[in-house]
């Protein structure tokens, strides 16, 4: 099996940066392409029968996404392989799984827990969703412990 199309969901957490470092090492070893993806979560509120997305909140989430991608991109400074980036909006687990299928990914590497709350204490809700709903292998990494890049 080759790891020529690696998808790395990033949310700014140390776990996602550790996943990016693992992805870099594998991509360099196998000559793979890495795609960093940040999913801006849904920010809609139900008010009566209407769904409202506060523009200021959406702008803040988009700006935060740019910072998240800058941190992840820094892991790949000097990387000689191909690096792509995607910023999506929606449910993070579903968006990551759909992108992995769309791109024909051969591996998803992600942190065990991201910035989520109580629902993700043992295995993050997003990583749990991706693990069970993505056809390609999924590598779940811990926050620390990578001695590579």
Image: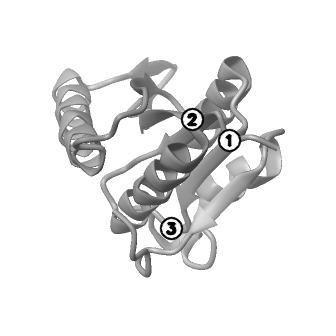
Q: Nearer the viewer, residue 1 or 128?
A: 1
| For residue 142, above or below residue 82 | below
Q: CA distance from mark 3 to mark 1?
A: 23 Å
Task: Read off the residue under disc 1.
Answer: 3
> Which quarter shows the C terminus?
bottom left
Q: Is residue 40 visible?
A: no
Whole-number angstrom distance, CA of label 3 to CA of label 2: 25 Å
Q: Looking at the image, can residue 5 be seen?
A: yes
Q: How dense is the environment of label 2, judged by Cα within 10 Å: few (below 14), some, or many (20 and up)?
A: many
Say which element carries label 1.
Answer: loop
* Numbered mark located on residue 32 in the image: 2
Residue 43 placement (x, y as % from top left):
38, 34
**How far from the left and from the top, in percent, is residue 62?**
24, 29
Q: Quadrant of residue 59?
A: top left
- Circles 2 and 1: CB atoms closer than 8 Å: yes
**How far apart in space, not on screen, are marks 2 and 1 (Cα)?**
6 Å
User: Can you identify the residue that label 3 sits on?
Assistant: 113
């Amino acid at each position: 099996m080759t790891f020529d199309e690696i998808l790395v969901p990033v949310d700014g957490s140390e776990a996602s940066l550790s996943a990016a470092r693992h992805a870099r090492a594998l991509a360099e070893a196998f000559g793979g392409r890495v795609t960093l993806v940040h999913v801006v979560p849904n920010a809609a509120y139900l008010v009566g029968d209407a769904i409202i997305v506060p523009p200021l909140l959406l702008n803040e989430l988009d700006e935060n996404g740019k910072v998240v991608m800058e941190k992840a991109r820094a892991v790949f400074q000097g990387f000689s392989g191909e690096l792509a980036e995607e910023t999506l909006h929606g449910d993070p687990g579903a968006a990551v799984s759909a992108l992995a299928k769309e791109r024909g990914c051969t591996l998803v590497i992600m942190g065990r827990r991201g910035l989520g709350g109580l629902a993700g204490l043992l295995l993050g809700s997003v990583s749990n969703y991706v693990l069970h709903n993505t056809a390609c292998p999924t590598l779940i990494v811990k926050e620390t412990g990578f001695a590579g890049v």
